[in-house]
């Protein structure tokens, strides 16, 4: 084979390999809990069709979100697909406007693939531009294209050891209760489920303008003719 064809083939293979690689994950801008090593092994909050656990969080700067996730266990013998949803809140004690999250405060959703037997941090892509304020990250089944999971045991946001945000609490959106209407349940402070948000802080507009003016001033100064 001619050398130039070999070079073209090698370039194409390298380009294909680079394209197949997953892009690097962006930094975590919020996490609710962590452990020094592995998770504690204690079930935190179960995830099912009826029980949708969530965790509130606060952002003090604008953030461009690229992904969300949690420390999730799927002890079932088959793979499942849950959903993750970002919801805007009015404050640290607020709940989503609707139990099924189908309201105007819903920001964005994504699907979470859970292979059988997994017990690890799971990150999924989710894009959203968030302004400073209060939000919640909620996980569940049987909505937004996710699988059905009628029974509760088997899938959970597992418990961790270190509460990184003691003023930002967990809750569960119970879709139905004893066959009747559902309710929001406040989880006790000891419920240290791990949820997290990945992305980057967006610089304030004023900072960007000042930086641009500074660059322009330097350029003008360099171009000014000497007397």
Image (tube, rainbow, N blue to C red):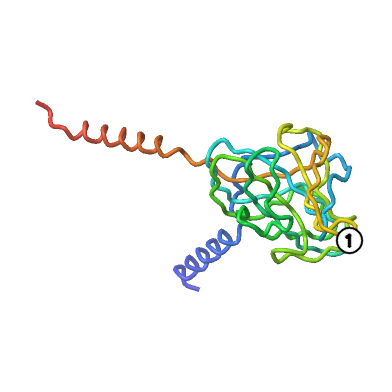
Residue 206: x and y in percent read 39, 36
Residue at (65% x, 50% y) in the render: 87
In the image, residue 73 lies at what x, y percent?
83, 51
* Above or below: residue 122 compared with residue 111: above
- Where is residue 69 drawn, in percent x and y? 70, 49
- In percent of the image, x 58 and y 51: which residue is there? 66
Residue at the extreme bottom of the image, as rendered: 1
Number of residues whose C-alpha sits closer than 10 Å to that of mark 1, classed few (under 14), some (14–19) or many (20 or more): few
In this rendering, the count of numbered labels is 1
Q: Nearer the viewer, residue 191 or 194?
A: 191
Pointer 1 residue? 179
Dividing the picture into quadrants, the one containing residue 147 is bottom right
Residue placed most toward the observer, 76 or 132: 132
Left/right placement of residue 118 relative to residue 32 reads right
Left or right, 123 with reference to 207: right
- Judge whether 200 appears above or below 222 on screen: below
Nearer to me, 126 or 178:
178
In the rendered view, does 219 fall on the left or right side of 227?
A: right
Q: In which quarter of the view is residue 85 placed?
A: bottom right
Image height of 114 relative to 195, above or below: below
Secondary structure of the residue carrying tag 1 is: loop
74 horizontally vs 58: left or right: right
- The residue most toward the top is 227
Q: Nearer the viewer, residue 180 or 124?
A: 180
**Quarter of the C terminus within the rendering:** top left
Give percent across and percent down for residue 121.
Answer: 75, 48
Rendering quarter of residue 84? bottom right
* Outermost residue toward the left in this view: 227
């Amino acid at each position: 084979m001619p050398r130039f064809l070999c070079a073209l083939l090698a370039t194409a293979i390298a380009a294909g390999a680079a394209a197949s690689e997953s892009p690097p994950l962006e930094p975590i801008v919020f996490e609710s809990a962590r452990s020094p090593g592995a998770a504690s092994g204690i079930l935190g909050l179960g995830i099912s069709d009826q029980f949708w656990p969530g965790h509130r969080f606060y952002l003090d700067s604008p953030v461009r979100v690229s992904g969300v996730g949690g420390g999730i266990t799927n002890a079932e013998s088959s793979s499942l697909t849950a959903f993750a949803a970002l919801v805007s809140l009015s404050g640290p004690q607020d709940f989503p406007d609707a139990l099924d999250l189908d309201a105007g405060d819903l920001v964005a959703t994504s699907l979470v693939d859970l292979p059988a037997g997994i017990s690890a941090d799971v990150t999924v892509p989710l894009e959203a531009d968030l302004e400073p304020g209060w939000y919640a990250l909620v996980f569940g089944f049987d909505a937004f294209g996710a699988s059905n999971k009628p029974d509760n045991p088997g899938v959970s946001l597992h418990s961790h050891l270190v509460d990184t945000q003691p003023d930002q609490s967990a809750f569960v959106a119970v879709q139905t209760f004893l066959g009747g209407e559902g309710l929001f349940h406040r989880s006790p402070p000891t419920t240290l489920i791990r949820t997290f948000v990945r992305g980057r802080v967006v610089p304030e507009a004023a900072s960007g303008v000042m930086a641009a003016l500074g660059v322009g001033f330097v350029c003008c100064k360099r171009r000014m003719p000497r007397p």
